[in-house]
Amino acid sequence: MTLSTEDVQKVAKLARLKLTPEEVEQFAGQLGHILGYVEMFSEVDTDNVQPMAHAADVTNVFRSDEVQPSLPRETALKNSPKTDGKYFLVPQILDGN
């Protein structure tokens, strides 16, 4: 599959990439090879293949949702560089106005 330089420039713009004309030419060929490889998958007969969400046969990997005691506040704040005893104190990052 061949990609035009316009296609590469459009993808670069969407990805917010600034490419030189040499890079556009280079990537057009490389991306064309990648798309050609992916296009080969359309030749595979998948009529008898069931859709799946996971490659391995996994049923339920989640633990049961049970209420457990929380970490005590004092323990959580113990390793904090700054605290007022009740909350973590962090540097202000937003304008206070």
Image: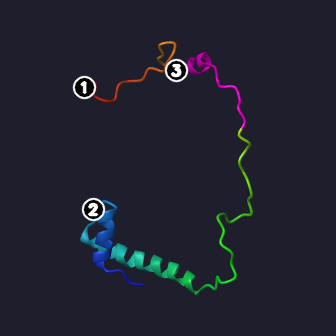
Which residue does the numbered mark 1 point to in the structure image? 97
x and y, in percent, of residue 65 in the image: 71, 40
Residue 82 lies left or right of residue 42; in this view the side is left
The foreground one among 21 and 44 is 44
- What's under tag 2, amino acid-wise? Lys
Q: Which mark is residue 18?
A: 2
Label 2 and label 3: CA atoms lie apart by 42 Å
Identify the mark nearer the N-term, 1 or 3.
3
- What's under tag 3, amino acid-wise? Ser
Under tag 1, what secondary structure?
A: loop
Under tag 3, what secondary structure?
A: loop
Q: Is residue 23 visible?
A: no
Q: Is residue 39 visible?
A: yes
Residue 33 belongs to the span the image colors magenta: no
Under tag 2, what secondary structure?
A: loop
Label 1 and label 3: CA atoms lie apart by 27 Å
Which residue does the numbered mark 3 point to in the structure image? 80
Q: Which residues are magenta?
A: 66-79
Assign the N terminus to one quadrant of the image: bottom left
Q: Nearer the viewer, mark 1 or mark 3?
A: 1
**10 Å neighbourhood of mark 2: few (<14), some, or many (≥20)?**
few
